[in-house]
Image (tube, grey):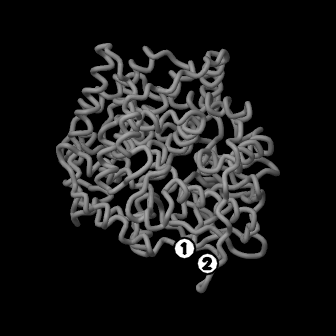
Amino acid sequence: MNKITPAPRTSWFIGVALTLLIAGCQKAPEEAATPAAQPGAPVVAAKPEPPAKPELPPLYRDIERRTFQFFWDTTNNVNGLTPDRYPSRPFASIAAVGYALTAYPIGIENGWVSRTQAVDRTLTTLKFFRDLPQGPGATGTGGYKGFYYHFLDMDEGLRRNTRVELSSVDTALLIMGVLFAQSYYDGDDKREQEIRDIADTLYKRVDWTFLQNNKPLISMGWYPESGMIPHDWKGYNEAMMVYVLAMASPTHPVAPEAWDVWTRSYEELWGVYQGQEYLTFGPHFGHQYSHVWIDFRGIQDEYMREKGMDYFENSRRATYAQRAYAIENPMKWKGYGENVWGLTASDGPRHTVQEYRGEQRKFLDYSARGVGFRENFDDGTIAPTAALGSLPFAPEIVIPAAVEMHERYGDYLYSSYGFLDSFNPSFDYDVPLGTGRLVPGKGWVASDYLGIDQGPILAMAANYRNEFVWNVMKKNRYIRDGLKKAGFQGGWLDAKTEQAAQAAPTAPPAPADLDAAAARALGTAESRANQAAQPEAARPQQPE
């Protein structure tokens, strides 16, 4: 889940772990004056029933194409490393690489790149990670025990600096992309065979037991200088994928009881917020990341069987709660409403306290923003990925949000690679900014795209159109095995449906986009122009 920058994300994890006994993944924001659920018997809204599948407007094809181009254009084609953010491009994010590996087949299916081009890029990436030095030293390596450091140098692939951790969840995001490539490239061509073989090597090399300081749980990470991060992954958050991968490992598995302990804290997180009854996690990426690759519709672990629902429905309710919060807008931020909503980990204007509507309000730069009945932080910063990355959950409210944000803010929020990371119409203070820029009369807007925010936008659109990413991943034996060891049953995991999923061909290619070449040229030209216009020293750097 960069989602996130090194220091802010680590401190958020620690703060949530200490206060909620769950693992979060960002700088721990101070509680804001947002209403929490009251004790007693809260009113629960009727379960939102999805209408007939809404059709995507033409805008969405443009969003998808531009978002794909982010990964294709900004990735280092010599080693396959994808920048954490662009155009700042200070370092690579291994999580962003996982999303890039997932993006390339989406590009193939849409006719935006050829299969040969995508195979070349994928093979370059996998070979680079296979050959990247590993070891316990503080410098000169890119990882250890099969895990990789959260942030790597864009050229050499080595650990960015001593503040960067060996990350379990970011390695999981990388490996999900690796296994997606393994299942997608199923041809007899020697290079596709090599992709499958290297993917197997990378997955089997991860020693999940190394990070088990408190068995059966898995730690958030490790530093050569100080050892294990003392906080473990406990539910509910984006790290479901960590345990699915760890339990399925054929070489270094963790015991299946890990899932029981992971879910043990769920009852503290189950409740009612904004009329929705669900497992809460404030920043919305926690309801999205594992869902990018795993289709949780109709499959249930023991906890969800008792609740009579599934994790997909949980994310749907969380999405409705986010929108309801924006409509209520208890903090009276500018712009919030029925079709302008979405709080997650994202860039923000800067760390400062300013007067807003007669009271002191705290604003942050990169941080986790979100709401729920357990934790709240909202400084008026909206991230389009929070809504757009939830497209399959609630298309009837996500599509209007995408359209309205584009119509109202697109002149300065929508550019070469789709939606910039975030914006804050309420922040118009004449103070030095940590990143982004002020638009006269419109507030603050980010200047970067973030790979971990671009990824869910693109992949979830593909899942909405034809379940593409989900269906490819259903064919991966490791994912199926990990889910079964976690106790998931039903739906596509049943024997008959599982056999059909393994035999099912990849979704047929979508019609080639005749404007793809023009879009690539335009996106590259615009991005280079923006970068060239900004002096190197003035370009915002992601905080570390």
Compared with residue 247, is residue 271 higher up or lower down, i.e. above or below? below
Image quadrant in which you'd find residue 523? top right
Q: Which residue is mark 2?
A: 37
Residue at the far right: name it.
Answer: 441
The residue lying toward the viewer, choosing from 52 and 234, is 52
Answer with left or right where residue 289 lies relative to residue 447. left
Answer with left or right where residue 495 lies relative to residue 64. left
Answer with left or right where residue 292 lies relative to residue 495. right
Q: Residue at x 44, y 62 (%)?
A: 304
Disc 1 versus disc 2: nearer the observer: 1
Image quadrant in which you'd find residue 392? top right
What mark, if any, has residue 209 been given in the picture?
none
Residue 368, image x and y in percent? 53, 59
Q: CA distance from mark 1 to mark 2?
A: 8 Å
Residue at the far bottom: name it.
Answer: 40
Helix, strand or loop at mark 1: strand
Helix, strand or loop at mark 2: loop
The residue lying toward the viewer, choosing from 351 and 183, is 183
Label 1: how many residues lie within 10 Å, few (<14), some (14-19) or many (20+)? some
The first of marks 1 and 2 along the sequence is 2
Instruction: Answer yes or no: is residue 350 visible.
Output: yes
The residue lying toward the viewer, choosing from 92 and 189, is 189
Q: Residue at x 20, y 54 (%)?
A: 209
Identify the amino acid type marked 2.
Ala
Instruction: Answer yes or no: is residue 3 visible.
Output: no
Compared with residue 167, is residue 534 higher up or lower down, i.e. above or below? above
Compared with residue 470, is residue 527 higher up or lower down, i.e. above or below? above
Q: Which residue is mark 1?
A: 271
Residue 459, image x and y in percent? 53, 37
Mark 1 and 2 residues: CB-CB less than 8 Å, in contact? yes
Identify the amino acid type marked 1.
Gly
Residue 483, image x and y in percent? 34, 50
